[in-house]
Image (cartoon, coloured by chain):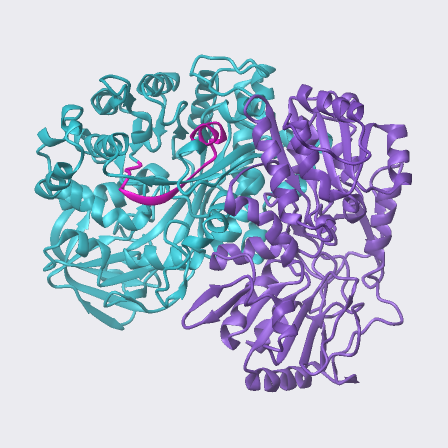
Chain colours: A cyan, B purple
Amino acid sequence: MNIKLESGNIFDPQNNIFNKKMDLYVADGKIVSKKNIKGGINKIINCSNKIVMPGAIDMHTHIGGGKVNIARLMLEDFHIENNKNFDSSSIIAPSTIKTGLKYIEMGYTTCFEPALLPVNARQAHSEMADIPFIDKGSYALLGNDDFFLDLLRKKASQSMINDYVAFILNATQSIGIKVVNPGGINAFKFNQRALNVDEKSKYYNITPRDIISKLTRSIYDLGISHPLHVHCSNLGIPGNYLSTIETIKAANSLPIHLTHIQFHSYGNNGDKAFSSASVEISNFLNKIPNLTCDVGQIMFGQTVTMSGDSMSQYRNHNHAHPKKWMCMDIECDAGCGVVPFKYKDKSFVNALQWVIGLEIFLLAEDPWKIFLTTDHPNGAPFTSYPHLIKLLMDRSFRNDILKQLPKSIRDHSILHTLKREYTLNEIAIMTRAAPARILGLQNKGNFSEGSDADITIYDKNNKDIENMFAHPIMVLKSGEIAVENGKVKNYLWGKTQTIKPEYDASIEKILNKFFDKYHTMKLDSYIITESEMSNLIGSEIVINKCKYERKQ
Amino acid sequence: MASRIKTNAEKHIVCPFCSLHCDDILSKSDGKKYSISSEESKVSEANKTCLKKIESFNINAKSILTPTIKNKKVNLGSVLKYTKQILNKQKDAIIINHGIDVSGLRSMLNFALTYNCSIDHINSKFLYQNIGIVQRTGYMATSLTEAKNRGDVIIVFGNNILCKTPRLIEKVLTPSNSLCTNEKNKKIIFIGEFPDKLLKNLSKKYNTSYIKMKMDYIPDLLNLLSDIDGVKIPNISKVLVAKIKSIIYKSKYLVATWSASDFINSKNPDKIIQSISQFILDRNKTSRASCMPISGSLGDTTSSQTLTWLTGFPSRIKYAHGSFVHDRNIYNNEIIIDKKNTDVVIHISSLSQDKIKINKGLKNIFIGHPNSKFTSQPDVFIPVGIPGIDYEGIMFRTDNVVSLALKKIRAINLPTTKEILDELT
């Protein structure tokens, strides 16, 4: 079908188009130029007085896999939100169907599960295949698996490590690599309760710095678009900004992405030994070219924290609200922990967490380097994004909420002094163009010819920016109308975004032996093939190109 | 649809019939009949039991390969038409899941949505005992490969767990290789009412201890091991308790394993499981320890995982008033049938070898494998293939973190459960 979107106010930062009134054309699910439309226009969508952006991209949201399902199961008593829209699951641990519905209703068309355990990949992909509307992808977890740590202990060559990393990306149908609490999850299995950046794990004698250095190098050598996605050591611990800075240095100037940076930007100053280190972290972000961050903003209210970081989650289980939680050691691969949590605006610590996230957003000079996330659902459910956008775009709104927080917060923060208000251009960059660029999604987040026609149309006359972003009037997914007049129209099914770097197949021989000896399944069962993705799991894959040929 | 099967070539398969889903076994098939063997040159007795079980699903003289209506053979079109008539008239149908793969479950949910059916799994009562600890308190868990490579002391509670998962001992509890522990020093403590002969044989090969006692005393024993005073257990020597305690407190990675169904005849199964979980939590204050419940003999974990991600609830759900709702009592299949709160029972059974109860006075639709057994003939029987034998599928292992892709090894031209449910939806 050929569609013309007529006279919209277009925001396409990738092509330096900001609020320009123009037409867009769509044919066979792709953006096309007018001259390349074959046949007539089948449908004209009047976009006058409408803001038109590429579909939004959530680059860090926990939407599929074992820990998500544990949260759904654990929080059964929260599943009471009967919206008469297929299911009653709670937005803090939504079913797959609800996940897709809520994302598309907000104009999000592509989302990435950031913590896919390789051994749990089949489940994660099966879950995500059951999320309607959106395209999805995942970052495979490495850096706590016994095979990798054993490679490091044996001082394996960088080339061999690269083979393993490339194998994992291929075998798990992922698009990136993430490391969570480097080495810490593994150390916790040996009863270590903390692991600093330069502290050696007792069993493998490896430091988190070693792991970061090897993995950032590997991602660089392989030409993977997305830098190593790092959940730093010491999550949530006062004073952890120092280990965050050391983690940045461990990348040796190679690209590195620090995720939910808010949780890793804590000082330990003041009478409460808890303070904001947003300035120190932002200085690094603004200074170092290859460093990017997503924020992981918290919002006040009930949520559930879920993480591969079993060491941290076990440490935090006493804060569970309600008082139930679960941690798990998983398959010599990684771990997970699920702890429900309620962020309270009257709590000094929670209020300061809210402040720190916003300070980092507002201190970041380059919107291409910082990404809008709540680390769903750890900081807040993804449905709070429109509220977060309003906090960033409306200083008086932000300050009104700040005034309601404990008075001592003002003494510990600079938020009230920050006058910056994000522009629509900047929001379009940080929710569309920048995530597409950093993930290497050439056909997403922009309106270039040949890109996927994932399009979100907002009402320009809606003066309430939160309401505008919460309720786009129309959303197209791959050129089909998914949402019309704010209501879901058709159920559509997206694809899985992957990358397939080259590797020397001899790594499989080594892995075969390792699996036969130590695992409880064979390597063949571990590997997910392209045909399995489409025939059994239920999601076709899209293979994105590496940035360049493998370097070593 | 039949597809080409490479005849007589040996290939690895994934066993669909127990929650370990072993993939180190080989099949040889002429397309119709298959044989199963081990990849090990020396086959254990436990493995032999499993191989025989898989082979027992071969087609035999009693296998039903043609659909029936009231015990009369009909073609597929007729049975689908007749079944739709029943479904269109029903008011309160219930689906009882006796085991199916992920694709079957996805279609089951669509089917339930279309006909406003409730869904329950035949083993839900055991599932809820284990889920209870996740939903009530804290819980530390581990998976099979962790237990194999890190567990230095393993406590096995129960009586029948090793019969249900015959290879648990050789694959996980006493493996020939272990990454982080000396496999020869692994210690296994049995607590409960295990067959004497089984334990005698195991004690010859492995470092085992045994506290033989009624399972109702498990919470008391764990209190004793935790130095809680005032606990007395008949016929249990203090010396034995002290020995067990010493082993446990020296462990670096303690694993507690059980099968909830072993506790079902106890006075308070929930209390037993809660006490084990609490004991493990307490051990984690100074050491490492984890629970590893074993379940899923009829695809229980596959069912609970898939339904949970699709609806938020693991079982006992119904589509009503625009959304899926859950109530573990109202949608309990046993209560529904006892109280006659249903008019049509739809059995879905790909894996069960048990005789399945057909409830008189109700319409019974049975969608199951050709070797299914019933207490009496259902109104409708639609034979379908078995995941992992007749078609490819995905099933979850007992630890809920590993799922495996099942393979196809024979072609007997039966539809899949998914295909039948989709036709009816």
> Camera-side residue: A502 or A254?
A254
Residue sitting at x 42%, y 16%: A197
Residue sitting at x 27%, y 41%: A299
Q: Is residue B149 left or right of residue A474?
A: right
Magenta stretch bounds: A296-316
Which image quadrant is residue A121 in?
A: top right
Which image quadrant is residue B65 in?
A: bottom right
> Camera-side residue: A408 or B414?
A408
Residue A304 magenta? yes
Residue sitting at x 17%, y 29%: A409
> Camera-side residue: B230 or A168?
B230
Query: What x and y, as percent, mark residue A302?
Result: 34, 45
Q: Is residue A197 left or right of residue B13?
A: left
Residue A78 magenta? no
Asked whether residue A218 is in view, the answer is yes
Query: What x and y, as percent, mark residue B2?
Result: 72, 67
